[in-house]
Image (cartoon, helix red, strand yellow):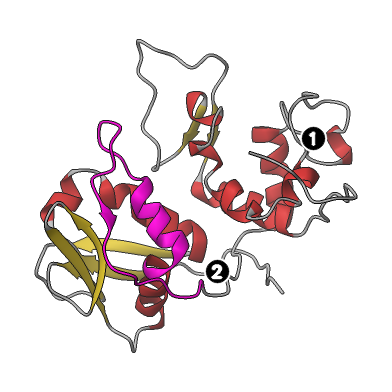
Amino acid sequence: MIAIEGHAQERTITISAPQEMQENGFLTFLLPRFKLKHGVRVNVTAPNTKADVVLAQEGAVDIFSKDAVTYRLAWQDSNPQARKFADWLRSDIGLRTVLSFKIDGKPPYSKATEVLVATPQVSLAGNVARGREASLRACGRCHVVGEVNRMNGIGSTPSFAVLRALTGWQEKFETFYILNPHPSFTIVLDVTLPFDAARPPPIVPIKVTLNELEDIVAFVAAMAPANLGAPIQHQ
């Protein structure tokens, strides 16, 4: 069962990582996605300094590689938030997040050795009522969010109830802004880059915060999936 609760006091850990990852945008890409998943903020410290989590060429567990270099992870197992980050980064979702990071259209990091662990149970931190409001504002112009806008969505766009029936619906909602067609008109504050002034979005952009995205996921989690009578076939 998924527990849904209001925003709790923010939890914070520190990570020490190579300077390269601090400069090439990787940590800016990675850490907000972990925060969205688990409500834990990760602050970055200088390489080779004491931290709750250390990502370096030496460590306890191989995580991913770049060229001939393998990066490894070490963490304070007595710290539950550091352990949660280590579990997430070693999970299938964490690895897919690492591999989805790109520089000039190419992923710099690749899978190292088999380090996957079972994905831990997630306790959603969002607020259902706020998620309903955020969904209507940000998504209601295209998607049917519920009865409140049942006649206002675009016919070819799936409703939230249909999306809720998909396998892996939660990850799809959490990463919707990288799934077409959303990147061309969506801004997630502190996560996505601003639009090029010379190439404005084709429609009025959608702007959401990470907290609003957490609320939207909580709202969808509390929604009954659409009963379509058969498993959904999608590509």
Q: Which residues are magenta?
A: 90-119
The kind of secondary structure the magenta stretch mainly shows is loop
3 or 66, nearer to the observer: 66
- Image position of 116 (left or right of 102): right
Hey, which quadrant is residue 134 in on the image? Answer: top right
Query: Which tag is nearer the camera, tag 1 or tag 2?
Result: 1
- Crowd around label 2: few <14 · some 14–19 · many ≥20 (10 Å): few
Q: Which residue is mark 2?
A: 8
Residue 145 visible in the current orientation: yes
Q: Amino acid at mark 2?
A: Ala
In the rendered image, the vertical position of residue 94 relative to residue 76, given as above or below: above
Q: Residue at x 79, y 27 (%)?
A: 153
| Residue 150 appears left or right of 76 | right
Magenta stretch: residue 118 in it? Answer: yes
Location of residue 74 in the rendering, given as x and y in whole percent from the top left corner: 23, 77
Q: Which residue is mark 1?
A: 144
Q: Is residue 54 visible?
A: no
